[in-house]
Amino acid sequence: MGYKAKFRVWRGDAGEGELKDYTVEVNEGEVVLDVIHRLQATEAPDLAVRWNCKAGKCGSCSAEINGRPRLMCMTRMSTFTEDETVTVTPMRTFPVIRDLVTDVSYNYEKAREIPAFDGGDVKPGEFRMQQVDVERSQEFRKCIECFLCNNTCHVIRDHEENKEHFSGPRFLMRVAELEMHPADVHDRRQIAQDDFGLGYCNITKCCTEVCPEHIKITDNALIPMKERVVGRRYDPLVWLGSKIGVV
Ligand code: SF4
Ligand code: F3S
Ligand code: FES
C-alpha cells in the first residue's frame, strides 16, 4: 500500500544550503533512492544526486539518512515508520558540489599514492597462492568504493587538517591487502605509518559498522597491519639498523 512520506532533503551548493521539506509518494518495496527519483520527477527536477546501479554495487549513492551514512539504493523505506520524517543529507566529510553530490576526489588522490603491487621477478606460473591468502584478498576486493567508511571515520570527519596525513580506512585496507599479499615484494609497514597515517586510527570500528559489503575493515585489515608495524619496530635487527642509521 502506498503512502505519502515526509522527506527533508539538503539543497544547496558549495557556498550554502538548507534542509527543504517535501511530501512524496512511496510505494511498497521502494528504497530511499526511488523516492529521491520521484522527487526529481515531480517537485524538484534540479535536485542533484549521484547514482548508477541501484543494486548496491557501484558505490555512487552514498549519503546520510537520518544521520546514518548509508547507500540510498539499499535503504528500504520499510525501515521507517510512515509518519517518520526521512532526512537525507550529503556525506559530511567531503565538500558538497550540489545537493546530495559531494566531491570525493580526496579518495582517488589517496588511492593514487599507494605503490602498486610488485611481484618482483616471479614469472607467470612460478608462484602458487594458498587458498587462505586468496580468501583474505577476496574479502578486501569486495569493496565497492562507496567511501562511507572514510566518510564516517572521526579522524577526518570533523578534522579537515588530518586529511593530508590520513588516507582513511578504505586505503589503509588497500595498503594492508598488499602488505599481506605473499607475492608482493614491498615492505609497506613503514609507509602505512608514515605516509598513510595508520597511527591516527584508534580502532573505533565505526568504519566497519557502516560498510555495506560487511568487510571487517578493522579486525581483518587495520589491526593486523598495526601488529605488523609494531612487530617491525621491536625487531632487534630493525632496532640495531635504526641506531646505526641504515633502516
Ligand atoms: Fe565502502 Fe566498505 Fe569499501 Fe569502505 S570498505 S569504501 S565502506 S565498500
Ligand atoms: Fe577510523 Fe575505522 Fe580506525 S573508523 S579510527 S579507521 S577503526
Ligand atoms: Fe549503485 Fe547505490 S546506485 S550503490
Image (cartoon, helix red, strand yellow):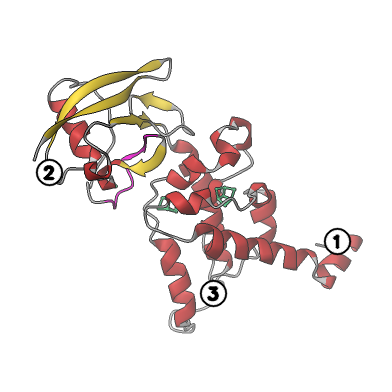
Mark 3 CB within 8 Å of ligand 1: no
Disc 2 or disc 3, which is closer to the eye?
2
Q: Is residue 63 magenta?
A: yes
Whole-percent x and y of residue 67? Answer: 41, 35
Question: In this rendering, is residue 23 above or below 139?
Answer: above
Q: Dividing the image into 4 quarters, which one contains the N terminus?
A: top left
Whole-percent x and y of residue 117? Answer: 52, 63
Circle 1 residues within 10 Å: few <14, some 14–19, many ≥20: few
Give whichever of 130, 246 is nearer the camera: 130
Measure how far apart labels 3 and 1 are at the Cα level.
Answer: 26 Å
| Amino acid type, mark 2 | Glu
- Residue drawn at 80 percent across, 70 percent down: 235
Do tag 3 and tag 1 residues touch (Cβ < 8 Å)?
A: no
Specify the segment rendered in magenta.
56-66
The reply, left or right, for residue 131 in relation to residue 72 is right
Q: Dividing the image into 4 quarters, which one contains the C terminus?
A: bottom right
- The dot on residue 28 is 2
Q: Secondary structure at mark 2?
A: loop
> What residue is pinned by disc 1?
242
Res. 179 image quadrant: bottom right
Question: In this rendering, is residue 159 above or below 184?
Answer: above
| Amino acid type, mark 1 | Ser
> What residue is pinned by disc 3?
183
| Amino acid type, mark 3 | Ala
Measure how far apart labels 2 and 3 are at the Cα level.
Answer: 50 Å
